Amino acid sequence: MTDLYGSTALIDYATSLFVAAGLPRDRAEVGAVILVEGDLSDRSTHGLALLPNYLEALANRSMARNAEITVVSDNGASAVWDGQRNLGPWLVHQGVGLGMDRARKHGSFCLAIRRSHHIAALSAYLRRATEAGFLIVITSSDPSTASVAPAGGTEAMITPNPLAAGIPTSDTPVLIDISMSTTTNALTARHHKEGRPLPHPWLLSALGEATTDASTFFAEPKGSILPLGGLELGYKGFAMGLLIDVLTSALGGFGRADSSEGWGASVFLQLFWPPAFGGREAFLRQTDHLVGLARSNRPVPGGGQVRLPGDRASALRSERLAKGLPLHSSILPAIEPWRQKYNLVAPSPIAVHRPA
């Protein structure tokens, strides 16, 4: 049995914790919404699980509380921001808002954000754009750390470097959120803490052997995460990961060539306004047709209808908004010391989920 929580109550709780830690309320509310969106869509390692880390960063000032964004360059259809180590979800939220305004004017808009703090789940930003009719792409990397080895190598070089995209259709949008690695740092850490092996040999030992043992990642000498494609096809994932490092850090002018500033992100986002290209109706005609081709594709034996990226997340999100949100068992206990520190009241469950 699992307790279920109302998403609004969880947003209010996270907002109150952020405000108590020193964030202005407008930034706190954005951060809270983005974190809860992660859990609504089953990104449980990139939702409220991140809140204690964010609160610690606010407490030790490795995350700015109320710094102003510095505009490094702005050419109308493209810009670079220095995020000044502000709350990542707030920075990206601001960037998407600017991007929609600029893309309506120019057809498309690109923004690189350097020196952001961590930005949580990339998928949490997509619906805002797709509901307004935009095609959106977001990528991120962390130039201060390395956890993924290059294909053919045994030492960590880049991070999982996720890519997310929101594609409007006439119905449910296609929502892509994938890493250029076989797994993520957060999921590896969770399995290590719980003493469980990973489901597949996604890690690489320092000797170059693929393994499911999560402790390999924390051993000395340290192991690494395999690029997407594993030992056989990892050159594809590494190539994409390398491209994302270039889009996020090289375009932003700050990355691995610079001194580390701690856990954070370099970000690249791009928005496209279909009416400025082939037209809205023509765009939707094509995306709807692609969706139809996938859904009508003959499934493998024993399988159901082919799913599009984001189908499961969208269904879970709708169900959890209506019935309540289950949280991973580690999340609320990790937040509890901060609740006690700031003398706040934790949300109460609204229901209990009993598996069939």
Image (tube, rainbow, N blue to C red):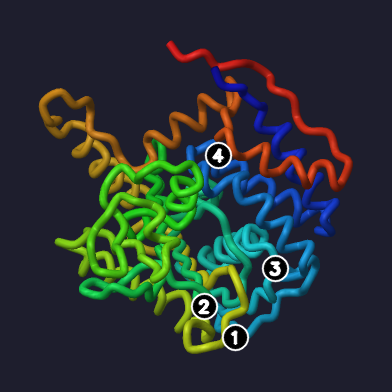
Report if the CB atoms under discs 4 and 2 are less than 8 Å apart. no
Which is more N-terminal, label 2 or label 1?
A: 1
Q: Quadrant of residue 161?
A: bottom left
Which residue is rendered at x = 57% and y = 42% of the image? 37
Badge 3 amino acid: Asn
Badge 1 amino acid: Ser
Which is more N-terminal, label 3 or label 4?
A: 4
Which is more N-terminal, label 4 or label 1?
A: 4
Which residue is rendered at x = 23% and y = 36% of the image? 292
Which is more N-terminal, label 2 or label 4?
A: 4
Mark-to-mark CA distance, 4 and 3 = 22 Å
Report if the CB atoms under discs 3 and 2 are less than 8 Å apart. no
- Residue 41 placement (x, y as % from top left): 49, 38
The residue singled out by tag 1 in the image is 73
Which is more N-terminal, label 3 or label 1?
A: 1
**Compared with residue 253, is residue 18 higher up or lower down, i.e. above or below?**
above
The residue singled out by tag 4 in the image is 39
- Residue 87 placement (x, y as % from top left): 68, 63
Query: Who is closer to the viewer here, 258 or 188?
Result: 188
Which secondary structure lies at badge 2? Answer: strand
**Total numbered labels:** 4
Mark-to-mark CA distance, 4 and 2 = 32 Å
Badge 4 amino acid: Asp
Badge 2 amino acid: Ser
Mark-to-mark CA distance, 1 and 3 = 18 Å
Report if the CB atoms under discs 1 and 2 are less than 8 Å apart. yes
Q: Which mark, residue 86?
A: 3
Q: Is residue 56 left or right of residue 233?
A: right
